[in-house]
Amino acid sequence: MVTLKDLKDAIPRMSENTCKRFVKEIFTLVKTVHDDGFIHHDLKLANILIMHDGTLRLCDGGMSRTIKDQRNQVANFDGKKCYYLAPEIREGRKLRKPTAVDVYCVGVALTHMRGVVSFVLRPLMPCN
């Protein structure tokens, strides 16, 4: 088994079809996490495993929080890499829809898989 980061390192610009397949499966996994009442809070290519059968699994849930506990809480960095931080976390705003931070991270992962390095390595907003 390898991570999506390992695959991205080997294939700097994944095809659109490969990305579509992966993103669809990642959203299914994220929906399961959210349906169970949690936010992963650390979605990135290094935390998505590609199993031997080609399916994906999320790993490293050490920063996970319950949705209930995060609603209307002021977001914080928790040591996360700046370019995966959702704007509400960067700005220290209350999380009105806590699950949105995971959705944002999937978008960043997609741009990374497609080789859009300038966006991923330089956040749209400065980190405080």
Image (cartoon, helix red, strand yellow):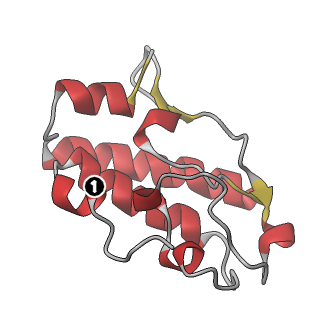
**Quadrant placement of the N terminus:** top left
Q: Using the rendered view, name the quadrant where residue 98 is placed.
A: bottom right
Residue 11 appears at what percent x and percent y?
16, 30
Q: Amino acid at mark 1?
A: Leu
Inspect this view and state whether residue 36 appears: no
**Secondary element type, mark 1:** helix
Residue 112 appears at what percent x and percent y?
27, 50
Query: Quick check: 2 left or right of 118?
Result: right
Query: Quick check: 78 left or right of 126?
Result: right
User: From the viewer's perspective, is residue 57 above or below residue 79?
Assistant: above
User: Which residue does the image show at 53% across and 49% down from the upper left?
Assistant: 43
User: Which residue does the image show at 55% across and 81% down from the upper left?
Assistant: 91
Inspect this view and state whether residue 61 appears: yes
Q: Using the rendered view, name the quadrant where residue 7 is placed.
A: top left
**Relative depth, front residue between 5 and 31:** 5
Instruction: Identify the residue position indicated by label 1 in the image.
Output: 121
**Relative depth, front residue between 68 and 93:** 93
Residue 127 appears at what percent x and percent y?
46, 70
